[in-house]
Image (spheres, rainbow, N blue to C red):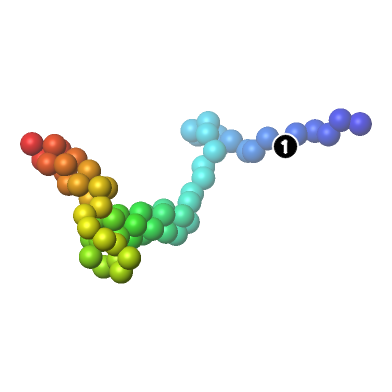
Amino acid sequence: MPASTHTPPRSATTGRVDMRLPWWALALPALAFVALLTLMLNPADAHAASGEPAIAHLVERAHQLISR
């Protein structure tokens, strides 16, 4: 016996599904990205870091190229 598939209802005015994300679905990944970027750009806060990390040089060089 084949099972029937359920299709989601479509909006009558726009013809597409109206979906809304909760606020934390965008806020949490953005917060995690900023936290990781901060750790990469400021290696002095990391206790196990030794010397200048190559990723900091790469980000600094990218910033210089973009600001031109």
Report the front residue among 9 and 24: 24
**Residue at 38%, 58% in the rendered image:** 32
Q: Position of residue 47 (x, y in %)?
A: 30, 69
Q: Is residue 53 above or below residue 8?
A: below
Q: Position of residue 15 (x, y in %)?
A: 53, 31
Q: Position of residue 33 (x, y in %)?
A: 35, 54
**Residue at 13%, 37% in the rendered image:** 65
Secondary structure beneath disc 1? Answer: loop
Q: Amino acid at mark 1?
A: His
**Residue at 29%, 62% in the rendered image:** 49
Report the front residue among 22 and 60: 60
Which part of the image, by quadrant, shows the N terminus? top right
* Residue underneath mark 1: 6
Q: Position of residue 20 (x, y in %)?
A: 49, 49
Which part of the image, by quadrant, shows the C terminus? top left
Specify the quadrant of the image occupied by residue 40: bottom left
User: Does 19 sit left or right of 44 as displayed?
Assistant: right
Q: Is residue 47 above or below residue 9?
A: below
User: Does 55 sit left or right of 12 as displayed?
Assistant: left
Report the front residue among 20 and 58: 58
